[in-house]
Amino acid sequence: MKKSVIIAALFLFAVGLSLAQTGEEDPKYTNESFARLSSISGSAYIQKGAEQSFEDGVVNMPIEEGDRLGTTDGRAELYLGKKTYVRLDNNTKLEIISLPKKGSDLTRLRVLKGNIYLSVNRLDEEKTVEVHTPDASFYVLDEGLYRIDVLENRKTDIYVFRGIVEAAGEEGSLLLKSEQSLAIAEGRYSGRPVRFMAVAEDSFDRWSEDRESGLAVQVATRRLPGELEDFEAELEESGDWNWINPYGWVWVPGGVGPDWRPYYNGSWRWMSLGGWTWLPYDPWGWATFHYGRWGWYGGLGWYWIPGTIWGPGWVGWWWGPDYCAWAPLGWWNYPMAIVDNWYYPNWTRPYYPYNSRALTVIHKDQLRAKNISQAALRGDSLKNFDKITLKGQGQTLKPASGQGITKKTGGPPAAGAERTIKAPAAKGFEPATPPTVRGAEKSGQAGDASSGERRIRSQDSSQAQGSGTPKKQAGSTVRKNSFGYPPSPDISIKKYSDRSLTSSSIRNRFYQSLSKSGSSSKGSSKSGSVSRGSSSSGSGGSKGSVSSGSRSSSSGSRSSGSRSSGGGVRKKG
């Protein structure tokens, strides 16, 4: 008991000391404020914020709100956190309007053209995930799998493979459930939602199915905290777990060379919300360089200690007149050092050793180099850096519009003056059981449940509509909304009282709810279920190459209304 009290006191003291040193407020970002470019098949490109320039997409590239992700002859997958993924087909362009931050859990996307799959496998609150197109807006009400096809200057088709979504347009909102589709052109619905046979009709379906199957991979033993469970499988495939006191389970990467060190094989990118942010080229690097800390042990090598707080890069920085340097922070948020095979987990001496195996030094003009490992100084060239003082503090410098970097505010530093680049994530060390990040509050989209599919809005909120075909509004100005059509406060998942059913029985739950509200899926289409290619909304998708390996993606086959025991979307015929 006494030992735990001492540890807690030391932790609080160190946190207070760290905050006093930085003099900064807590960062405004959360664990989901930066999306991860998690997979690329072919080629993809990124357009940063308002910049007109483009750059090639790289796996593990951090994406922030305001960025645009596009594909030409390739496909890409974006990890949004909390088991949510968006996948882009060939010739698709997606804008990230907003991502969660402190004070808001909202994820807002805009599909400019092409086809996407949205896989939502955890939804803490309805309507916190939005997708907007030139023709309509969609608000996710439940976990599920959704495909949206945007035929540029023509129409938008949405297919609900599983889940519930609200479609908002010029004529109000409609509710779509599993195995229903809808076509919208310039905010006008082509009719009521119709049923479709959810089969893999094109190569994009099959590619998404293959990616979706990876979410179902289970490892024999879980060693990561719940916040990081999405990365359990990829770490299991790329390294080994070992138990080291006092940290518990630590992960050792496999296949790294003798010269490898943390924050070495990759590049630094300036992000408006997080400052200098590490882009790891190691495929498993998203979790290991943005969460937790690193350590080293003779005979074992480098190991990663899991943590639950996301950071741009957990390093201590030094900035000199012509060069900058960094080293990974240890578990207690002090720079680590490795000198002559002796490991110092918390280096607190005035000057950091230039011959430490954990140190990386580059010329300041190379901070934005595409490959830090090639730009880093080596051997005797490091002997002149015997006055380095590493500090785990937030950034004070940012890149200029051209090469190099400049100060955020104030005049230029004096010649030869020492400057530091801070790492805002280093807000004190984490205890043996790291604290979790509290979920941000959602920026308000409340509403009570309503019976039936819902009332259709007009400019006069007092008007309502029955259950027939939506009534068109003359001269509606809803499209002027910068984020598309607003959601209806009358539509809510809370109308479904039975929330204990699993996704394998979700269709039965939908149909039971429809029966209670006096409607059925048969009323949506006179001919019953049809394949996506023959539904009123048409068939989208490209005919690109098929990804190798066929894996199931959803809870049961939907071909001909039957479900197989193996799960997955089954091809027609």
Image (cartoon, grey):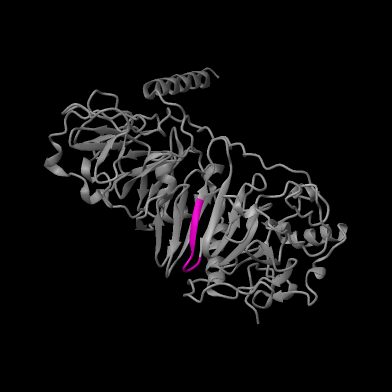
Q: Tell which of 555 and 47 is nearer to you.
A: 47
* Quarter the N terminus occupies: top right
Q: From where the camera sits, is residue 232 visible?
A: no
On the image, which quarter does residue 120 sit in?
bottom right
- The residue positioned 24% from the left and 40% from the top of the image is 357
Label tally: 0
Position in image of residue 460 (x %, y %): 76, 48
Relative height, residue 347 to residue 270 (above, below) = above
Is 93 colored magenta in this rendering?
A: yes
Q: Tell which of 66 and 5 is nearer to you.
A: 66
Residue at far bottom of view: 573
With 526 as the anchor, is 265 left or right in this view?
left
- The residue positioned 84% from the left and 58% from the top of the image is 466
On the image, which quarter does residue 420 sit in?
top left
Q: From where the camera sits, is residue 413 visible?
A: yes
Position in image of residue 521 (x %, y %): 80, 67
With 354 as the anchor, is 43 left or right in this view?
right
With 32 as the anchor, is 457 left or right in this view?
right
Q: Which residues are magenta?
A: 89-96
- The residue positioned 62% from the left and 61% from the top of the image is 146
* Quarter the C terminus occupies: bottom right
Relative height, residue 89 to residue 270 (above, below) = below
Relative height, residue 409 to residue 451 (above, below) = above
Position in image of residue 220 (x %, y %): 55, 53
Q: Tell which of 412 and 566 is nearer to you.
A: 412
- The residue positioned 49% from the left and 74% from the top of the image is 546
With 442 as the anchor, is 304 left or right in this view?
left
Position in image of residue 309 (x %, y %): 48, 37
Is 207 colored magenta in this rendering?
A: no
On the image, which quarter does residue 409 sit in?
top left
